[in-house]
Amino acid sequence: MSVFDDLVGQERVVSVLRDAAAAGAQALAGGRGMGMTHAWLFTGPPGSGRSMAARAFAAALLCPDGGCGHCASCHQVDAGSHPDVESVRPEGLSYSVKQTRELVLRASGAPTQGRWRIVLFEDADRATEQAANALLKAIEEPPPRTVWLLCSPSPDDMVITIRSRCRVVTLAAPSSAAVAEVLVRRDGIDPATAAFAARAAQGHIGRARRLALDEEARARRDAVLSLPRSLTGPATCIAAAERLVKAAEAEAAAATGELDEKETAELRQIYGDGSSGKGLGKGLVRGGAGAMKELEDRQKSRATRIKRDSLDLALLDLMAFYRDVLAVQLGAPVELANEDRRGDLDALARESTPEQTLRRIDAISECRERLTANVNPQLAVEAMALALGARRP
C-alpha cells in the first residue's frame, strides 16, 4: 500500500516523486533543508490527477516511510487535517491578492511536526495578476522548510516568472482501461459499468466515478447528448440553449444554497445578530455590513464559477460527441467515448459531412472561449446551438 496507488497510468511521475521525497528526507537528515526543491508545478489535462499527485507527494514528504499510506501522517494528509499541509482552492472565479498575501503569511511559519510546511495550491492558474506577483515573491525566497505545490492544466497557464522557478511535473490522461480497473478495484463497481464510465469520462477519474455511482450525473450527461439530434431549427436551438444554461444555474444553486445560508448565519452571529442588551443587536450587525458585503461577493463569485464549470462540462461532452461522429465518418479505428449512443453517432455521421462536423466542433470551442471571456452565457450558448443546428453543406 502506498499514497501513490491511485495515480492511474502515471508510473513515470510516481518514480520522480518517490525519488524527490527520498531526497527531501536525506536533506533534512543532513540538516540541509535548502537542498529540497521548494516549488513544484503539477500540470496535466482535467482528470489526470494533478491535485491527487500533489497530495500524494505532500504525504510522502511528511511520512517517515516516504508515503506508506497507513501511518497517522498519511491518513491526516488524505483527510485534509494535517497541521502542516494547507490546501487552497479558489472558491470563486479567481484568487485575490489579499487571499494570497494571507496565505503567504501563514506559509512562512515553521512546521509543527518538525518536517515540512506544505502549501497545496489547486487551480493556481486562477490567481489574478497581483496575486501571482505576491505568490512569486514567496516562491523566490521561501522559508527553508516550506514547499509550494501548485496545480495548473498547463505550464503556459502560469506566468513565466513563476513557471521558471518551479520543477514541472506533467501528468498524462490515463487510458480508459486503467480508469476502469481502478473503479473496479477501489470502489467495487461492476466491470461493465466501470468500462462505460471510464470511456464516457475520457480519462477523468473523478468524473468516471461520479458517472458510475451517481444516477443524476448520468441523467445530466444523457440530457446534454440528446441535444444534437434535437437541433432541427432556430426555435429548437434557442430552446436547447436555454435548457443548458438553466441546468447549469440549477446545479450552482443546489451546490451553494445550503453553504451560503450557513456562512451568512455564522457571520451574522459573529456580529451579534439576534443578541439582546444595550449596544448589541442592530448596532453590531451594521458594524459588520462591510464583512457581509464581502461575503456576498464571494458567494456570488463561487456560484458563477460553479455555473461556468457545469456549462463547460456539458460543452466538453458535446465536443466528445462530435469527435466521435467525425471518427465514424472517417472510419478511424479509435475508442469512442460515446459508444453507448452509437445509434445517434451513426445517424449524424450519415446526415452530415466531416467538414460540417469540424465546423460544429469549432463552434463549441468558440463558445468555451467566449464563456472564459465573460460573455453572457445565454448569448454564447445560443450562438453555439444555432451553429450546431446549421444544415449548410
Image (cartoon, rainbow, N blue to C red):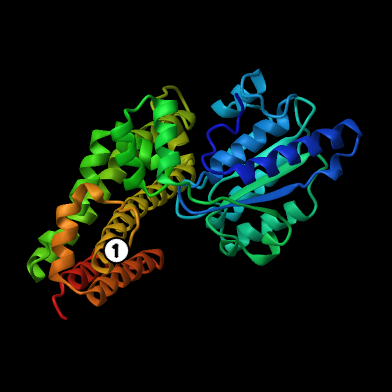
| Depicted 358 relative to depicted 3: above or below | below
Residue at the (60%, 37%) spot, across then down: 55
Q: Which residue is mark 1?
A: 327
Furthest-right residue in this view:
30
Question: At 22% from the left edge and 49% from the top edge, which residue is drawn?
Answer: 247
Asked whether 369 or 276 is in front, the reply is 369
Residue 114: which quarter of the image? top right
Callout 1: helix, strand or loop?
Answer: helix
**Residue 178 spot, x, y in % from top left:** 45, 40
Please state if 375 lies on the left or on the right of 61 as rendered: left
Q: Residue 263, can we see it? A: no
**In this image, 151 relative to 239: left or right?**
right
Q: In terms of image quadrants, where is residue 393? A: bottom left
The answer, for residue 366, to whether it is visible in the render is: yes
| Rendered view: 40 above or below 364 | above
- From the viewer's perspective, tell me whether residue 393 is left or right of residue 308: left
| Residue 330, x across and y down, in percent | 28, 69
Q: Amino acid at mark 1?
A: Ala
The quadrant of the picture occupied by the N terminus is top right
